[in-house]
Amino acid sequence: MNYKRTSLLLLILLGTQAFGQGKEQWENLFNGKDFTGWKQLNGKAKYEIQNGEIVGTTVAGEPNSFMATEKEYGDFILELEYKVPQGMNSGIQFRSLSKPDFKEGRVHGYQFEVDPSDRAWTGGIYDEARRDWLYTLELNPAAKPAYKKDEWNKIRLECIGTSLRTWVNGVPAAHVVDDVTMSGFIALQVHAIGKNDVPGKQIRWRNVRIQTKNLKASPPDNVFVMNFIPNNLTEKEKSLGYTMLWDGKSTTGWRGVNKTNFPEKGWEISNGVLSVLKAVEGERGGDIVTEKEFSAFDLQFEFKLTEGANSGVKYFVQGGLGLEYQILDDEKHPDAKQGVVGNRTQASLYDLIPSIKERRGQHKVGEWNYGRVIVYPDNRVEHWLNGYKVVEYTRGSPIYNALVARSKYAKNENFGIGEKGRILLQDHSDNVSFRSIKIKELK
């Protein structure tokens, strides 16, 4: 036996297998001829096959319709092409479910948005029939022009672990980190139409393919990450400069206003949630602030209200006074009707600028909300609520100064325009919870 030759052949064989394992392994999800491996769910929009394409046609009086894979997928990379006419909304469901015990079998789960309207949110991530928008393209406006109207568009979707990333014609669009659903079917949506809309509009899909083995994530990019895992910071977020402002378990980095220690009562840390408790017989713990001061920053936090509650997140705080991102039950708390033109309502710059009320950005009392305050080095400031920008202003501008002069802060010299200040969580004697408090300092 020629041992040298045998060893050489074995090495070549092993090398060939290793090379094959590293290559992309695509599988066609649609055979181009029939709907083998697929089933229709919910509405009765018309699905047919023409020239190797799946064609979906709107039907009057029908709810959202879905052509779904019979098989469920967890980790995968999906690519396909689609073409949709103006005035028609659609989407691609992924890691989605349809169960009798959830809204009588209604399809629910993640959706790659297809939006040919002027809003241009194609590539955003929506949570169908569940939590609404997870990632609007207002969070990444650079991706809006990627969609080509009235042409074939190519999408790429990567679901690897808790990371959900989208591309439109090669342009990075959305990045969500979430663990609510880790496996489910893929489905092509024909959206319901209004009673005055003419039926018969068509959306087309082709070249539908998937990878499920030897997955290799695309290289990191600078797309903003919406992370819905409580008190979690991904390596991507760390690389972008974010740190946890609250560690999810202790009082480290925080203290009472004008105190050296954290309040002994009135606040509670439990199961990764920091809560201000409802005052008992008028006694409360008081506001808490960061030990560190900040100037320009991107602050993110989740908050949850109880019925009728009032609180706030203040920034550029000196003592206990600062600019306030209002947190409020607008329906039940009387402060919503105070001030001027709603400038004391949810996510407003308290007593100065009312927030824009986006219906889909308003989560119910008892549900978690995603708040964000961005202060740029040039003093531009933005308030965000659940993926929508709701307030925009510039500290120290003539308009800002005029607003302060007409507010409750008129007698506070240089209110809100200091070079730096602390972040404050307000105790307004009501039960309000916080988590996932993170910050990035901007240069």
Image (spheres, rainbow, N blue to C red):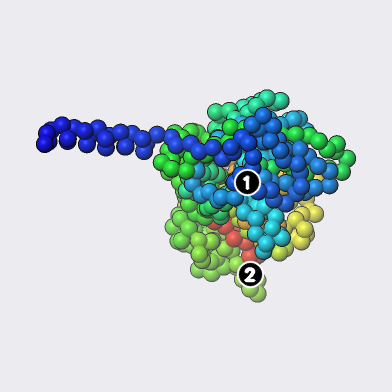
Q: Where 12 falls versus 247 (above or below)?
A: above
The crowding category of the residue bearing disc 2, from other C-alpha atoms within 10 Å (few below 14, some 14 to 19, many at least 20), is some
**Residue ID for mark 2:** 279
Q: How far across and down, in percent of the image, does residue 351 sit?
A: 72, 48
What is the three-letter code of the residue carrying label 2? Ala
Residue at horizontal 49 percent and vertical 46 percent from the top: 75
Work out how far the residue at label 2 is from the one at label 1, CA to CA, in angstroms: 56 Å
Q: Quadrant of the N terminus?
A: top left
**Residue ID for mark 1:** 38
Q: Where 8 falls versus 435 (above or below)?
A: above
Q: How far across and down, in percent of the image, does residue 313 sit?
A: 61, 52
Of the two numbered discs 2 and 1 on the same chain, state the one appearing first in sequence. Answer: 1
Front label number (2 vs 1): 1
The furthest residue to the bottom: 281
Q: How far across and down, in percent of the image, does residue 47 sit?
A: 72, 40
The crowding category of the residue bearing disc 1, from other C-alpha atoms within 10 Å (few below 14, some 14 to 19, many at least 20), is some
Q: How far across and down, in percent of the image, does residue 254 sit?
A: 48, 56
Q: Secondary structure at mark 2?
A: loop
Residue at horizontal 68 percent and vertical 35 percent from the top: 49
Residue 18: in sight, yes or no? yes
Q: Secondary structure at mark 1?
A: strand
Question: Residue 185, which numbered label?
Answer: none
The furthest residue to the right: 196
Badge 2 vs badge 1, beta-carbon distance below 8 Å: no
Residue at horizontal 68 percent and vertical 25 percent from the top: 151
**Front residue of 247 and 128:** 128
What is the three-letter code of the residue carrying label 1? Trp
Residue at horizontal 62 percent and vertical 54 percent from the top: 97
